[in-house]
Amino acid sequence: MDLRVDGERLLRDLADLARIGQDPAGGISRTAFSPADARAREWYRDRCAEAGLALELDGLGNMVAGRPDTSGVAAVWTGSHIDSVPRGGAFDGALGTVAALECVRRIAESGRTLRRPVRAVVFSDEEGNYGHLLGSTGMRRGFSEADLAAMTGRDGDRLVDALTGWPWAAGAPTATRREPGFLHAFVELHIEQGPTLESAGTDIGVVTSIVGLGGGLVRFSGRADHAGTTPMDARADALLAAARFIGAMPDLARRTGPASVVTTGRVHVEPGGANQVPALAEVLLDFRDPDRARVEQLEEGIARAAHEAAAAHGVTAEWEPDEIVAPVPLDDRIRDVIRASATGLGLSSVDLPSGAGHDSQNMALLVPTAMVFVPSREGRSHSPAEHTDPADVVAGADVLLATLLRLADE
Ligand code: GLV
Ligand code: MN
Ligand code: MN
């Protein structure tokens, strides 16, 4: 059990991947199905080819790398995502992607024979530009033609257009569903994206559960009018309704539960002239709670607040909620394996829940799944400030490798 990752190679890979999608405005913009996402996939394909790993694609662009295997024995998968939020950091998703590649590569070059194949997966659009955890949701439930046709990105572009001619997908996007139990286990390494590990001085987080996710769009529709000639009381100002609605969100979260959060990350206003009363304001929402019933309460509260704000400003509101991604507990037995692997490497560990969403929450509904966290400096994430110390990166990858070796020999 003494196999370790090649730390230098892992850190070099992480630095190389971080150069792809650098945004002149700061951070990394490698959003799903963008040219930067394609360049990152080319980089990944080249690393796989160098290591003699075959790469398979599905119809939504999920990628699985490993040694060719015809044994039919249920495999162990590890991996994460290569896409980022706009102006995000260099570690979210990237760490789990390069560490998974390093583990599979290390096992291949060690010549070690394991009972089960170990494969590295890269999920498409984890950040949910087109749909929450798009690629892994495709594996969990599959999408119909109609589902896919209705999905649009934050800029209003259609998923089906983004996929047309996209070279990093193969087969039908409606044929991505996997059978429950198709793997022996799935393990994802990720940065914590919160402050717990750093403040406690703990090396490794063993994730207990992942938060439930909701989202959607509120569309306020009013009337465009002249900004100079329309009296204040004669307006149907869609943006004023949106502002009132947004202002009500912190209170809704506080009333719903101690761990409830609501975020309005984007507002789109039309027609958009300073001398025009806004006729349209679309507010994009993200809301979460560890308890599904509370995610549903937030969804109802949002609908109510939208209609109240619309009525107060003489406009109309439409609420288009996304499908809720359920909160899930992770697998107790694999968590024990992770803890034992950390202890075996002389590393401290602690149990903690995840407030961020992960593809693991879809995988957990299909196969036994667990996650390993490493510290995030000052808990910062979804920002260029994201940072994890090199020693923590390597320690996390070593815990991942030791965990995979144990699981693959079961
Ligand atoms: C993924 O990073 C999410 O939690 O939105
Ligand atoms: Mn993220
Ligand atoms: Mn992530």
Image: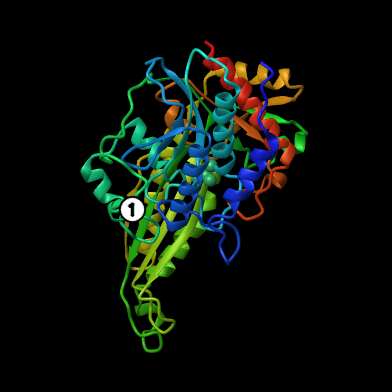
Q: Is residue 116 above or below residue 383?
A: above
Residue 279 appears left or right of 244: left
Please name the amino acid that badge 1 sits on.
Answer: Trp
Q: Quadrant of residue 346?
A: top right
Which one is in front, 357 or 122?
Answer: 122
Which one is in front, 94 or 383?
Answer: 94
Is the shortest distance between ligand 1 and the CB of mark 1 under 8 Å?
no
List x then y, in percent, for residue 292.
44, 33
Residue annotated with mark 1: 319
Q: Residues within 10 Å of mark 1 (few under 14, many from 20)?
A: some
Which one is in front, 398 or 364?
Answer: 398
Residue 146 appears left or right of 15: left
- Describe the colour scheme in one phrase: rainbow
Number of numbered tags placed on the structure image: 1
Q: Residue at x 67, y 42 (%)?
A: 11
Q: Secondary structure at mark 1?
A: strand
Which one is in front, 227 or 191?
Answer: 191
For the N terminus, which image quadrant?
Answer: top right
Q: Residue at x 58, y 18 (%)?
A: 405
Q: Report whether residue 258 is seen.
A: no
List x then y, in percent, for residue 158.
30, 56
Q: Quadrant of residue 132?
A: top left
Q: Report whether residue 124 is seen.
A: yes
List x then y, in percent, for residue 140.
36, 31
Q: Residue furthest top?
A: 410
Q: Quadrant of residue 348?
A: top right
Q: Residue furthest left?
A: 146
List x then y, in percent, for residue 101.
54, 34
